[in-house]
Each structure stands twice: as structure tokens, then as C-alpha cells.
Image: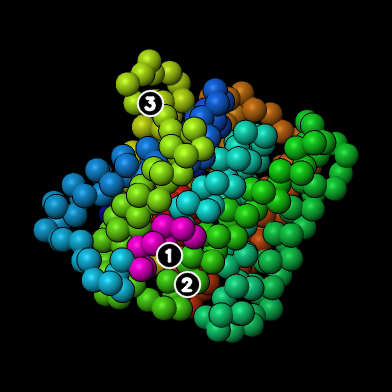
Amino acid sequence: MTRTPVLLLALAVSGAAWGATQPLNRIVVSEGYRHFGILFWTSTLGVVALALLCLARGRSLPLRTGDLALYVVVALIGTVLPGISSYTAAIHLPAGLLSILLSSIPMLAFPIALAMGNDHFRWRRLLGLALGFAGVALLVLPEASLPDRAQAAWIPVALISSAFYALEGNVVARWGTRGLDPVQLLLGATIASMLITLPLAIATGQFIDPRGPWGAPDGAILASAVLHVVAYSLYLWLVGQAGSVFAVQVSYFVTLFGIVWAMTFLDERYTGYIWAALAMMLAGLFFVQPRPRGMLASDPPVGQSAP
């Protein structure tokens, strides 16, 4: 097998794993589990997997004051805050629709990058942003776009998570990672997320008792945490092998596989307006992606799954 097919296979597997987390999130919230409890256990499972990965690589976790601050910031804007909105939206919106909305991350990253001085104005990327907003409008405005018109009110809630992911990438691009490699940063941020969400889960009555009995939501939490580590590890490998411009194309696979898995395992079906919105969002994604060289502001977020 030549190098290019291997890279394409890794891209597809990473996107398929990331895309599967959207239907899994729908299952996680289906029986009453809520964001703080879910975030605590996904973070805890992620810490175990990432710690083993760091150990296998012979890398320790730096604990300087500046590093700790960075872990907390990335945990908040890359996991905790977007997690609250995404798990809340998952209660009310189809998983396939959430996958479509995730493709807005690179589009929202562009105006944030302009505001923070991370990027320069480009007409091509403005066109991508406009197509993305047109796709969202197709979901919200027509009467027949959603099975239940009340669902339209939850689309802005889902977009809050995309905005936080876009902000996270720009924050890291603007102020750097203090010499931490991505796995170290992700481990530190995941530990911070675990420590932040545990008291919140207990205080709000959202803590999930791990003693069981286990049901489908518990299995979905475990599967989602494992798939995220697999997908992100593959993404990091792709960045090292082929650069971030190639690796960020995983966004297409995340959206498409998210829809395929939702249709296959949740039996979701969509109106013509939703398919048109998907086409608009994918077109916007094409125009907004960086071309000459990769920019972290357009890469998937460090803290959690995203295209």
C-alpha cells in the first residue's frame, strides 16, 4: 500500500470515529443523563487513555504555573462550555443535524481569527462563511425544514459549541502552547475538565453512579470517550505525516459519517431542506479551508471532538 492510500484511510477512519460520537451523544442523553455528569466521565476515561499514550511515548505532563493556566483555559473553551451546549442541544435535535452544524467550526473560526489578528481578510473565505450561514438559514427559516418547528430554537444552542471550538483554536494559535505537544496539552486540559466538572456534577445532582446497572447511555459514554481518543490520535498522526491542510479535511468525513451513522443506527431521516443545508455547509467548508499552509485557527479543537 502506497503512502497516499494510507493517509486517505487514516483520514476516513478518523472522520468515521469522530462522526460516530454525534449519534452516541444522542444515546447518552436519551435516558436523563446531563452535561456535567457526562463531561466528568468522558473526561475521566479520556485521562486514562491519554495518560497511557503519554507514558508509551515517554513524555511527562509539565505542571508549571503557566501550563496549569493553559490547561484550564483549554478545558473551559474546548470541553466544558461547548459540552454544556452540545449535550443540551442533543436532547432536542437529530444527531445528523448536529453533525451538519459541526461543519460550521472553520467558518466561525474565520471572523474570530480576523478579530484576533490571526488571519487576513480573504474573499474566498468570506464566501465560505456566507454559504455556511445560508445553510443554517435553510435549517431555521422554512416551515418544512425540521420534523418539529420547535427544534429550530435549539439550533443556536448547538452553534454555541461550534463558536467555542472556533475560539479555542484561535486562542491556541494566538498565544501558543508553551512548548507542549498536542497530546500533553490535551491530557492536561482533560484533567482540568475532570476536576472542574466533578463538583458541578455533584452539586447539580447530575453525577452518574458508575456502579450500575449499566444501560445503553453508559455504554455510549465509554464508546464516545474511546472513539475520541482514537480519532484525535489519528488526526495528530496525520498532521505530522501530511500537514494540517491535509489533516483538516477530516471535517468532511466527520459530517458525512455523522449523518450516515445517525441514519443507520438511529433510523433518522431528513427533509430536502436539510440535505440542501448539508450541501451549502460542505461548499462553505470547501471555501473557508486554508489552502497554502495550515493554520491552527482552522484545525479541529484541542479539547474535544470537532471537524
Residue 114 at x, y = what percent? 61, 79
In the orientation shown, which residue stands out farthest toward the right? Answer: 143
| Disc number placed over residue 209 in the picture, else none | 3
Q: Which residues are magenta?
A: 69-77
Residue 295 at x, y = what percent? 46, 73
CA–CA distance between discs 1 and 3?
28 Å
| Disc number placed over residue 171 in the picture, else none | 2
Residue at position x 57%, y 76% in the image: 113
Helix, strand or loop for disc 3 = loop
- Amino acid on which disc 1 is placed: Val
- Amino acid on which disc 2 is placed: Val
Q: Is residue 171 left or right of residue 269?
A: left
Residue assigned mark 1: 73
Residue 8 among those drawn in magenta:
no
Disc 1 or 2, which lies upstream in sequence? 1
Q: Residues within 10 Å of mark 1 (few under 14, many from 20)?
A: many
Q: Main secondary structure of the magenta part?
A: helix
Residue at position x 53%, y 35% in the image: 34
